[in-house]
C-alpha cells in the first residue's frame, strides 16, 4: 500500500494529512499555525524603502521594495512547509504528495520544494481548503 501526504495550506496555516490514497483511510497528521500570515503590509514593522536621486536634476523618489512584506512572510512559511515535506520524503514517510492551496500560495509553495519532492506530487488543487475535515477531503481529490 502506498502512503500519500496531503498538504492543505494558505499563508497563515496548514494541515497535513496522510492517506492510503486512493483509498478510504485518511488521518490528520498535524496542523501548523502561522499567524503572521494574516498581517497586512501596514501592520508589518519593516524599514521604509530607500530614496534615490535622479542622475540629472534634483528630483528624489522612493525605491520600491522587490517584495512586499506580506509576500516575504508567505514565502518564509512556504519554505518551512517545504522543509517539512522534504524531510518526510527523505525519511520515506510517504510515496506521493498532493498539494492544496489557493493559486498564488500554491505557486510559492511549489517554488520552495526541491526537485526530488516536486517529483512526488501526484495532484494539485487550486482551492483554499485549510479548514476541511478528513471526511470531506476526498471529494476534492482525483
Image (tube, helix red, strand yellow):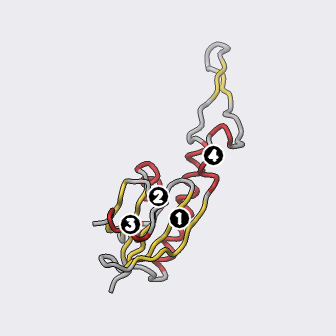
On residue 137, the disc is 3
How many other residues sit within 10 Å of disc 4, few (<14), some (14-19) or many (≥20)?
some
Query: Could you tell which of marks 1 and 4 lies nearer the N-terminus?
Result: 4
How many other residues sit within 10 Å of disc 1, few (<14), some (14-19) or many (≥20)?
many
How much space separates mark 1 and mark 4, taking CA atoms?
19 Å
Q: Residue 40 lies in what quarter of the image?
A: top right
- Which residue position is annotated with label 2? 109
For the residues bearing labels 1 and 2, Cβ distance under 8 angstroms: yes
Q: Nearer the viewer, residue 11 or 113?
A: 11
Name the residue furthest top.
Answer: 57
Q: Secondary structure at mark 4?
A: loop
Q: Secondary structure at mark 3?
A: helix
Query: Could you tell which of marks 1 and 2 lies nearer the N-terminus?
Result: 1
Q: Nearer the viewer, residue 79 or 131?
A: 131
Q: Residue 3 lies in what quarter of the image?
A: bottom left
Query: Could you tell which of marks 4 and 2 lies nearer the N-terminus?
Result: 4
Q: Residue at x 36, y 71 (%)?
A: 120
- Which residue position is annotated with label 1? 81
How much space separates mark 4 and mark 3, taking CA atoms?
28 Å
How much space separates mark 1 and mark 2, taking CA atoms?
8 Å
For the residues bearing labels 2 and 3, Cβ distance under 8 angstroms: no
- Which residue position is annotated with label 4? 39
For the residues bearing labels 1 and 4, Cβ distance under 8 angstroms: no
Query: Of circles 4 and 2, which is in front?
Result: 4
Amino acid at each position: 500500500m502506498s502512503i500519500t501526504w496531503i498538504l492543505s495550506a494558505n499563508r497563515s496555516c496548514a494541515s497535513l494529512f496522510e492517506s492510503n490514497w486512493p483509498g478510504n483511510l485518511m488521518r490528520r497528521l498535524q496542523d501548523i499555525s502561522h499567524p503572521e500570515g494574516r498581517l497586512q503590509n501596514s501592520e508589518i514593522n519593516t524599514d521604509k524603502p530607500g530614496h534615490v536621486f535622479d542622475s540629472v536634476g534634483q528630483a528624489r523618489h522612493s525605491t520600491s521594495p522587490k517584495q512586499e512584506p506580506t509576500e516575504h512572510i508567505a514565502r518564509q512559511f512556504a519554505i518551512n512547509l517545504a522543509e517539512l515535506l522534504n524531510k518526510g520524503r527523505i525519511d520515506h514517510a510517504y510515496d506521493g504528495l498532493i498539494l492544496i492551496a489557493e493559486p498564488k500560495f500554491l505557486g510559492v509553495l511549489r517554488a520552495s520544494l526541491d526537485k526530488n519532492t516536486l517529483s512526488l506530487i501526484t495532484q494539485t488543487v487550486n482551492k483554499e481548503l485549510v479548514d476541511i475535515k478528513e471526511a470531506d477531503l476526498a471529494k476534492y481529490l482525483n
